[in-house]
Image: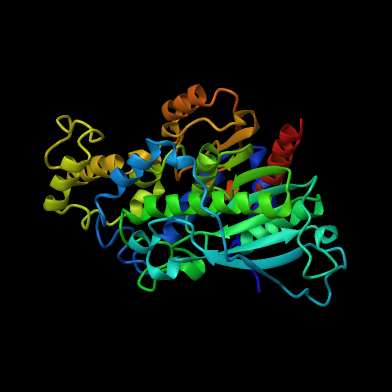
Amino acid sequence: MWHPWQLLQSLRRPARVLDKVTTTHHKVLDHVTATLTHNPLLFPQGFFADGWGDLHVPTLLERRLATDDKFTVAPIHDLQWTTVPRLPLRRANAPVVLQGSFRTTLREHEDLLPPVCHTAHCELVLPADMMPHDAAAPIQGQGRALVLILPGTGEHGCTHRRKNVAEPLARAGVATLVLEGPFYGKRKPEKQRGSKLRRVSDLPILGIATIEEAKSLLHHCKQHYNFDHLVVAGGGSMGGLHAAMTAALFPGDVGVASWVAPPSAIPAFTRGLLALSCNWQSLAQQRELAMIDQLLAGHVAHYADLPPTDEVAHVKQRLSAFLALTNIENFPTPRRDDAVVFSQASEDQYIGANEAQWQLVRARWPRAQFRRVTAGHVSGILFETEAFVATILDIIQTLRR
């Protein structure tokens, strides 16, 4: 059965033709996709229907980033792999897919994550020649590169990333891990509709859990399988932001392919298309707004220039303060920032240009590359996977030099 995104990929060829005369279709595709995925009939409550959630989460994460504790990597003790049976008609040299699961390595997971999120799920896609003949023998990664692909916003399961990124990389001789993030797929809370997180605090919790699990997977594969070159790649959007954050907090040499990602969670939810599906009414409770002002006094912007009747604008200011810790410039420079590529979509309607913030990132990560992709947010993720794979291979070559 086709994944829904594969149906949209059938538009790739006509989009290529239109690229020769205009780029407007990329913006249109973003808006059409937003209209479908944020339809109030399908998702009447939208994002953050249960309000702000745990108001202490920003302070908790800020304290962690302020110390060297942020570089600590929690070990994985219970990762077991199961080989996915090959389809009868697949070629003998087709990539091998292993499925694995392990206990999340987020230390405070009992308090921060719902129980369904406590078990992390992933897939390891290997070139056929890397699979040991003896099933009990360890995977031999010496001399090889390993890519870890993180999920984008609302990306349930691993199918799209496996089919369009991991398998092409395997055919190029590169092993790839595909991680399913908390709150998505098998880890989606029962009451959550689609990808619409029910509380604002779920968003930074999702981020820190993904980062900690990614760090643990990189450490585990380097320690147990001896991979020489590690690249953490965002599967687009939020995954690209988390990829950069993972590299910043990993105590080793890691490359980054951040694909059509924002420099922060703020623009997507306050100015981009995701703002259209936020439940602003549930976030406008005066008691919680007053508590946010008190807890985040150092981050909350001055509201005097906002009309007192513009309730949504005031709520967006608080949301920006709550999510300020997701700004990538708050994170340290990775050890190999020369092996970091931020690829930005020129027509992105989900996150916008954000040039001022990207300038801060350029100053903080001076050796990183910043590339432009002629695409929107959706077309960049669906139509430009070949360019994404090529970028990852470029980064591997940089790490080998």
Q: Is residue 135 left or right of residue 257?
A: right
Residue 21 falls in which quadrant of the image?
Answer: top right
Q: Is residue 170 left or right of residue 283?
A: right
Q: Is residue 14 visible?
A: no
Which image quarter is the C terminus in? top right
Residue positioned 55% across, 65% down in the render: 102
Which image quarter is the N terminus in? bottom right
Which is more toward the observer, 24 or 147?
147
- Relative vertical location of residue 65 with respect to residue 88 in this rendering, above or below: above
Place of residue 28 in the rendered image (x, y in percent of width and height, measured from the top left): 50, 48
Place of residue 354 in the rendered image (x, y in percent of width and height, measured from the top left): 43, 32
Name the outermost residue toward the bottom. Answer: 88
Q: Is residue 236 visible?
A: yes
Residue positioned 49% across, 25% down in the render: 364
How are the colours assigned in the image? Answer: rainbow
- Relative vertical location of residue 24 with respect to residue 170 in this rendering, above or below: above
Which is more toward the observer, 394 or 116?
116
Residue 290 falls in which quadrant of the image?
Answer: top left
- Relative vertical location of residue 81 with respect to residue 65 in this rendering, above or below: below
Residue positioned 51% across, 52% down in the render: 74
